[in-house]
Amino acid sequence: MSAAQRTPGRGMPCEERRELIAGAVRARGRVQVADLVRELGVSRMTIHRDLQHLDSQGRIHRIRSGATTTPGPTTA
C-alpha cells in the first residue's frame, strides 16, 4: 500500500496523531470520538487512549463520547 493510499492515522506516530486531535479540538471547540475514528482511520480504543492522554496533560477536556477545549481561567 502506497503512502497516498494509506488511511491518515494508520502507521502515524501516536504523538503526531495526538497533535492532530488537539488541533481539531482547538479549531472546532468540540470533537466526537466517532468523527475522529472516521477521519483518522483508527479504532475507537486508540482515540479513547489518545483523548485520555491529552486530558491528563491538560490539553483538552474529556467528555462523554468526545472532547472539548479546556476551560479557561474564570474571572470574578
Image (cartoon, rainbow, N blue to C red):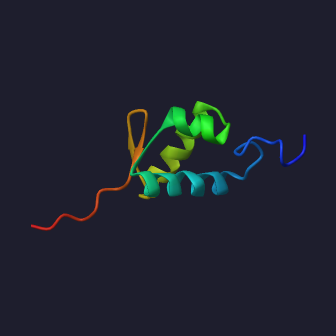
Q: Position of residue 46 (x, y in %)?
A: 61, 38
Name the side, left or right, on which 49 lies relative to 8. left
In this rendered view, identify the residue nearer to me: 50 or 10.
10
Give the image quarter of residue 71: bottom left
Residue at coordinates 56% horizontally, 45% vertically from top-left? 50
Classify residue 42 by image quadrant.
Answer: top right
Give residue 15's position: percent from left, percent from top.
Answer: 64, 56
Q: Position of residue 62 (x, y in %)?
A: 40, 44
Vertical placement of 39 versus 22: above or below? above
Q: What residue is rendered at 52% in x and 57% in y?
A: 23
Q: Quadrant of the C terminus?
A: bottom left
Where does the image place residue 36, in percent across and percent down from the top left? 56, 40
Seen from this angle, which residue lies furthest right?
1
**Residue visible at 49% across and 44% down?**
52
Q: Quadrant of residue 59?
A: bottom left
Total count of labels: 0
Taking the view exactly as shown, the residue that stands out farthest to the left is 76
User: In the figure, 72 relative to 54: above or below?
Assistant: below
Q: Is residue 39 left or right of 35 when viewed as pictured?
A: right
37 vs 57: above or below:
above
Is 39 on the left-hand or right-hand side of 67? right
Q: Residue at x 50, y 45 (%)?
A: 51
On the rendered image, what quadrant is the N terminus found in? top right
